[in-house]
């Protein structure tokens, strides 16, 4: 006779469900591990802060939100170039992507010590655009750290640019010297070919001419 006790019936049902039948069910869909590339593999992050980014709309003459997420300064391992990259936290969509160059200057936003503004030739939309950005941090300390780090990078890029210009100038001078030396060598060869023959060479040529039989004799 079946038991009418609900708790007893539930225990029997649970025992049946927990019983190991030994059967193995293969998964319907096999998920494979996929390597995700971000384009940042050859760069080192020298700054990574949470913030909210705005872009100034020139047509509407107002600030428009670009997204909230992590703003990073990434230094390339080989070239030493530094770029600013910011992605939205949820979608990972890029909302800022530009190089930090010697002329990059970050200024405090008027009336808000947690925000700052700067101009940049941005490439986040797939083409270079002159943008005016405003970024807002959760604390005054983070805003200050952002400004100081960008300033340090801009100064280091200026020094690197000056060194590249000096190296280019030095290389140009070396190439010019080599070019002058080559011209001197060419002049020397020409002068050697136009120089009068020595007495020994002239005598040898004369004797060779006398030994040559005249045709028809």
Image (cartoon, rainbow, N blue to C red):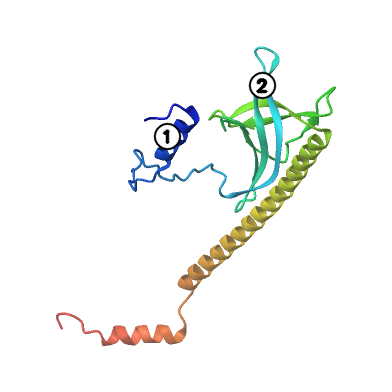
**Position above or below: 89 against 158:** above
Q: CA distance from mark 1 to mark 2?
A: 56 Å
Q: Viewer-proximal residue, 71 or 106? A: 71
Q: Viewer-proximal residue, 204 or 80? A: 80
Identify the image quadrant of residue 118. top right
Residue 72 picture location, percent across and down: 67, 40
Q: Residue lying furthest left in this view?
A: 216
- Helix, strand or loop status at disc 1: helix
Q: Which residue is mark 1?
A: 13
Nearer to us: label 1 or label 2: 1
Q: Viewer-proximal residue, 86 or 138? A: 138
Residue 109 picture location, percent across and down: 80, 25
Side of 5 relative to 99 (left or right): left
Side of 45 relative to 125 (left or right): right
Identify the image quadrant of residue 13. top left
Q: Viewer-proximal residue, 18 or 134? A: 18
Tell me the residue at 62%/57% (across/down): 171
Tell me the residue at 54%/41% (across/down): 38
Tell me the residue at 60%/53% (across/down): 78
Q: Which residue is mark 2?
A: 65
Question: Which is nearer the N-term, disc 1 or disc 2?
Answer: 1
So how many labels did they put on this image?
A: 2
Side of 114 relative to 54 (left or right): right
Q: Residues within 10 Å of mark 1 (few under 14, many from 20)?
A: few
Side of 29 relative to 176 (left or right): left
Tell me the residue at 34%/43% (across/down): 25
Q: Residues within 10 Å of mark 2 (few under 14, many from 20)?
A: some
Q: Residue lying furthest top in this view?
A: 60
Residue 191 picture location, percent across and down: 51, 70
């Amino acid at each position: 006779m079946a038991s009418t006790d609900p708790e007893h019936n539930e225990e029997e049902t649970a025992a049946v469900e927990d019983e190991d039948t030994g059967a193995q069910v293969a998964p319907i869909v096999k998920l494979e591990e996929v390597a995700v590339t971000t384009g940042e593999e050859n760069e080192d992050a020298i700054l990574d802060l949470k913030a909210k980014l705005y872009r100034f709309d020139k047509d509407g003459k107002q600030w428009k939100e670009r997204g909230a997420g992590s703003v990073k300064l990434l230094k390339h391992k080989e070239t030493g170039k530094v770029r600013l990259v910011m992605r939205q936290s949820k979608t990972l969509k890029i909302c800022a992507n530009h190089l930090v160059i010697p002329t990059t200057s970050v200024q405090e936003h008027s009336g808000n010590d947690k925000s700052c503004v700067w101009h940049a030739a941005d490439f986040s939309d797939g083409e270079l655009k002159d943008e005016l950005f405003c970024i807002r941090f959760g604390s005054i300390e983070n805003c200050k750290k952002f400004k100081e780090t960008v300033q340090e990078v801009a100064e280091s890029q200026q020094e690197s640019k000056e060194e590249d210009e000096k190296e280019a100038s030095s290389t140009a001078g070396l190439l010019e010297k080599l070019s002058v030396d080559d011209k001197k060598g060419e002049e020397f060869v020409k002068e050697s070919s136009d120089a009068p023959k020595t007495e020994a060479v002239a005598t040898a040529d004369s004797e060779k001419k006398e030994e040559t039989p005249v045709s028809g004799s």
